[in-house]
Image (cartoon, coloured by chain):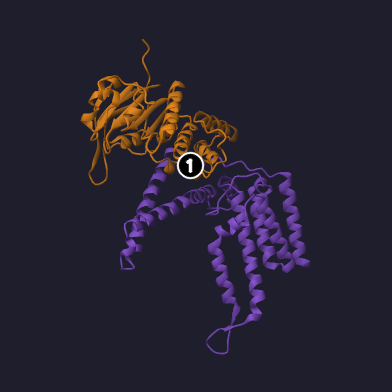
Amino acid sequence: MRAVRQLIEIEGVSHHFAGGDRSLYNVSFAVGAGQFVLLAGANGSGKTTLLRHLNGLLAPSRGAVRIDGLSTVEDVGGVRRRVGLVFQDADSQIVGETVWEDVVFGPENLGLPPTEIAGRARRALAAVALTGFEQRLTHQLSGGEKRRLAIAGALAMQPAVVALDEPFAGLDYPATILLLDHLKLLHREGKTILVATHEVEKVISLAQRLLVLDHGRLVADGNPAEIAPLLGRHGVRPPCSVVHGGTIVPWN
Amino acid sequence: MERLGYIPGDSFLHRLDPRTKLGLLALLSVVSMQGKFPVLLALTALLVAAFADMRVSMRGVFGAIRYFLYLLSGIFIIRLFGEGSGWLPQLDISTAAPAALFCWRLLIVVLGGAALIIATSTAALRGALVWLLAPIPFISGVRAAAMLALLVRFLPLILDEAAQTGEALKSRNIEQRRNPFIRPIYFTGVLFRRVFARADELSDALQSRCFSDNRTPPPLRFGVADGWVLVSSVISMVIVLLYL
């Protein structure tokens, strides 16, 4: 059997914020290339802090984070090329005045030639069904469109890992369905997907693995079907079907 | 139009290179300051035509620059008063025509700036700024251009934050407080906290997308139309300055 390449390696990571608050306690896990991982936890459980470690925005107080073998402390530039982080608040992430300006922002930072930048931007917009929106002003987009643009901005960097922080926050039903379809597609294309959310019901059917954070500790890691009934203990609502004794069903 | 900002389009002005547009604005400023009534009339007609071509109503433009218009009205009124014999200034109606002419000149420059903003994306302006600042030592054109782009992007968000903060305070009856300082204290405190939080998030967003000084600048295209427009504008300026 061929061994799966470990794309994300987190070893004994603890994080202390200034002032002494601890957000993560000795968290360890590894994610293989191409996996779809759901990171569940209640508010304040440390999900966002953990995602920021993946992108090198935070450095661990103890332990180590490696992406594709690169340390987030020693090669932060290389790490950021490999991890596309989609923030919870899309408005904070969108830096372009128009959709096109925002999508080309990342590739421009990599110093790529203009033709390569244009090609990447077109492909990224097509991947989230925003083709034709190029000249639209970003502040006039709907919440769902902004979220998709934030994903396109990350995809244009051609990352191996796409990490999304509470991607369903503020999205209505059609926008959520569209986003789920895009996540499915990205996973099928071979991207490693990491979704951090407390709304597990929407995305759990896509996940191959479920990690649960509770007060900064990794308390469960494994098959979503086995762990889902235990979510309630950690402040996360289990999927409705599971609450009623059934199995995990797609959310739509 | 609530605020001045880029409006995507395909007008003649939209198609020009941003460097040409900056050059035109500089020429417009010189000519409007020197030109007399017929020249100002011609410039105004040109600007009205440019806005029509961009499908932007003059009413919308005046709405967006309303605060400048208030300032202009103040300037007009101040210039109506001459020095009196005593310490009080005296109303002098004979200065009305030159005061109006002066305000008209300023208005033309501001309308030119508005046309430039409406017809030029921030990315294009950024490219032009990088190009213009490149020969100047010790100034990072890339950094200055990035600051401009971020300002343009985040100014509307800050104004939205201010509006939301104002409404939140009103919804909790801040207007019932008699102390006139309470409202500004709460308003600025909350607004500053929110703006700084957003600035932190922006900093993270820039880092996560590998922001660097060695960015690829946006492509600039100086076409035949740009050449014709610039040459004819310079000739027109020379004619105006020498003969009109």
Q: Where is residue A115 in the image (x, y as percent from the top left)?
A: 60, 33
Q: What residue occupies the far front of the structure in this picture?
A: A244
Q: In this view, does A208 lie above or below B33?
A: above
Whether residue A114 is visible to the viewer of this picture, yes or no, is yes
Q: Between residues A8 and B212, which one lies in front from this camera angle?
A: A8
Q: Where is residue B18 in the image (x, y as percent from the top left)?
A: 63, 49
Q: Is residue A238 above or below residue A105?
A: above
Q: What residue occupies the far left of the structure in this picture?
A: A233
Identify the element where label 1 is drawn.
loop
Q: Colour of chain B?
A: purple
Q: Is residue B223 above or below residue B42?
A: above
Q: Is residue A112 above or below residue B132?
A: above
Residue that appears at 42% across and 55% down: B163
- Asked whether, in this view, residue B51 is left or right of residue A63, the answer is right
Residue B108 location, quadrant? bottom right
Label 1: chain?
A: B
Q: Between residues B111 and A202, which one lies in front from this camera angle?
A: A202
* Disc 1: which residue: B212
Q: Between residues A208 and B30, which one lies in front from this camera angle?
A: A208
Residue that appears at 46% across and 24% down: A185
Q: Where is residue A69 in the image (x, y as percent from the top left)?
A: 37, 26
Q: The orange chain is which one?
A: A
